[in-house]
Amino acid sequence: MKIRSIAQLFVAALLLNGCATAPTFAPFTGAPEVVSLKTRFGIDKNGNFSGIVLDKLTDPNIWAGLVAAGCSVFSDDPADCTTVGLAVGNEIRTFTDRRSNNEFYGKYFAPPGYQICKAKIDWDHTGIDSQSTFSTIIQQDGLGYYASIPSLAGRGTGINSDIYLQFVKTGLSSKYMCWPVGTHPWNCRGPGCTAGPGYGFYPGARYP
């Protein structure tokens, strides 16, 4: 399925909801209201995921750097940022389902007791080749994504991007002015993200 519009992305999101179930764990106690972080998304024409796998992180120093970057982008309270332990990051599970030779559906699941609030894409550190698509959607249990990569020979085919995720404790979406479920932070095709109607960024989703 080639996604050409926001409407088609919504249909893809419904398909994703049918193939992924959020992990269930006991909510964290004593954790801050908001958890923001930076991560790296990367996938090539062969379906190899080359980004950061948050639930596999073991180095607390790397995690601290990702949290510091996320807090800076979302202007979170620095005092809260220092209390976000690696255990939270290890519960941000990533799911990817390959539906065809070059189409992928996935999700960054919110850690237990949290919901996705906002997501930003670092456009200065993003590479999307001219025939690839990278789209996201705010869902009840996390940030869903769709990636389409052409099966072409040569280097540079694929998607690589620094992205920022903000999670808030369940029930606090109004306090943090979270984007509504169904919002598409970005729907990009090619290096300009302007392939036609329906492509582009939700206000505030492009960084810087």
Image (cartoon, rainbow, N blue to C red):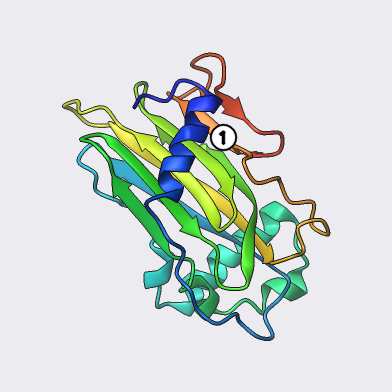
Q: Residue at x 60, y 80 (%)?
A: 27
> Mark 1 = which residue?
186
- Image quadrant assignment for residue 37: bottom right
Q: Residue at x 38, y 62 (%)?
A: 53
- At mark 1, the secondary structure is strand
Q: Position of residue 70 (x, y in %)?
A: 62, 58
Quarter of the picture holding the N terminus: top left
Q: Is residue 207 visible?
A: no
Q: Position of residue 71 (x, y in %)?
A: 68, 61
Q: Position of residue 131 (x, y in %)?
A: 34, 22
The amino acid on which the numbered mark 1 sits, given as a three-letter code, is Trp
Q: Is residue 198 above or below residue 87?
A: above
Q: Residue at x 55, y 82 (%)?
A: 26
Which of 56 and 156 lies nearest the eye of the viewer? 56
- Which residue reaches farthest top? 196
- Image quadrant assignment for residue 68: bottom right
Q: Is residue 58 above or below residue 197?
A: below
